[in-house]
Amino acid sequence: MFRFLFYTDLHLHAKQPRHRADVYVESVLTKLEEVYDIARREAVDFVTFGGDFYHSWRIFAYEVINAAMDIVCGAGVPTFAIVGQHDIYGYNQSTYVKSTLCFQERHCQGLQVVTEPLDLGEVVLYPVHGWDDFDQAFRFNVTRKKKTVLLIHKLLCDTDQPFDIFQTSDYDWPYNLVLAGDLHSGFPIHKVGRTILANPGSIGRPNRKDMQRMPKVLIVEGQPRKELDIREVFLQNAKPYEEIFKAGILDDIGAASAAAFGLASSTAAAGDEFAKQSRALGFNVEAYQELQDAAERSGVSAETFNSSMTAFTKRLGEAAEGSGPAKDALEQLGLSAEELVGLEPDVALAKVADAMRGVDDPARKAALAADLLADQASA
């Protein structure tokens, strides 16, 4: 008999996400401690990790690295991990040796990145990292004499999503169990043929799109000639979303601003077009996703949102040159167009949102939002 724990997507970093009301790094480290407390309580033989331990391939907050290493290295139970795309640079395997996770592995006897099939006696682990292509999962010579577990860091899901994913039901899996990371929302435990698949979701919740999901781990138990047993264990120290998430940028601007956008409704832009749009406007893709999610919650369509963000970046440029409707609006809010135009677009929009909080009159707020965000060319 064997027993192990699986968790994924810690996304540890020292920067404070804009939408978190608590101290993010402290919250994540506390959850990491609980993960290994659960491992000890459940008397597991080992722990497995599904990738993206750090939010960036290099972080220089040594007190954060030390704290993480103390927890993992001092756990008294080995951890076998795969590498996510956040743990390296540009999906490039060669950058791993320069990464923070590699430093941690080199100085932590209790942590091992699995680079080839790993036979642990009664069970064999098979790794597919963020740098691998998806088909690597089907290139292994998978044994049928022992229990087999695929650890994979890919956008795998049991349902269709508004972006490119690998749907679990589309494949003939040669494993007893597939444990996936990467997709923060996770997916439920289910079977495809004789294979069990699961993703408990990310431990870290850096974005507001994660806010209504409570972090959890999986406990896997196996015995010869019996199907694997999998249990979900929710983290008890994870706080409800209303205690840790602040209002988002578009939520701060409020319903009056949504009215200025037009209040149309539709589905989110998908995959490549979404990424192209965010890059064209100078936004970080993740920040753009947060903004669009907030817009949709206010009833704003993806098309209207995209045109509004295009208008915002254009209006800032005009205002910085002393012209356009945004010039007076920014002056009324006490903001400098010259300062805003030099910032990342999502940071500039955040400053506008902060200033809009001080506007009590809904009609005035809507007028200011229209001057800054509405696409008047289509009005």
Image: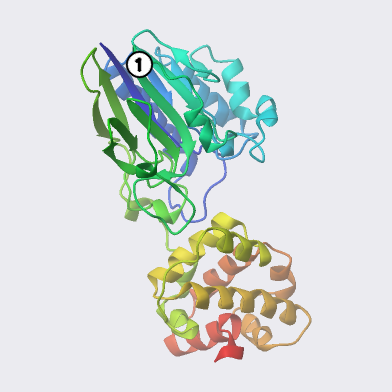
Q: Nearer the viewer, residue 51 or 55?
A: 51
Amino acid, disc 1: Arg
The reply, left or right, for residue 290 in relation to residue 229 is right
Q: Residue furthest right?
A: 321
Q: Position of residue 247 (x, y in %)?
A: 42, 63
Q: Residue at x 49, y 76 (%)?
A: 358
Q: Which quarter of the figure has residue 345?
A: bottom right
Viewport quadrant of the N terminus: top left
The reply, left or right, for residue 346 in relation to residue 190 is right
Viewport quadrant of the C terminus: bottom right
- For the rendered model, the colour scheme is rainbow
Number of numbered discs on residues: 1
Q: Position of residue 174 (x, y in %)?
A: 38, 27
The reply, left or right, for residue 329 in relation to residue 239 is right
The reply, left or right, for residue 195 in relation to residue 29 is left
Reply above or below: 245 against 4: below
Q: Is residue 34 visible?
A: no
Is label 1 in a helix, a strand or a loop?
loop
Q: Nearer the viewer, residue 334 or 82?
A: 82
Reply above or below: 43 against 215: above
Reply above or below: 74 against 217: above
Q: Which residue position is annotated with label 1?
A: 144
Q: Position of residue 309 (x, y in %)?
A: 59, 73
Q: Which quarter of the figure has residue 39?
A: top left
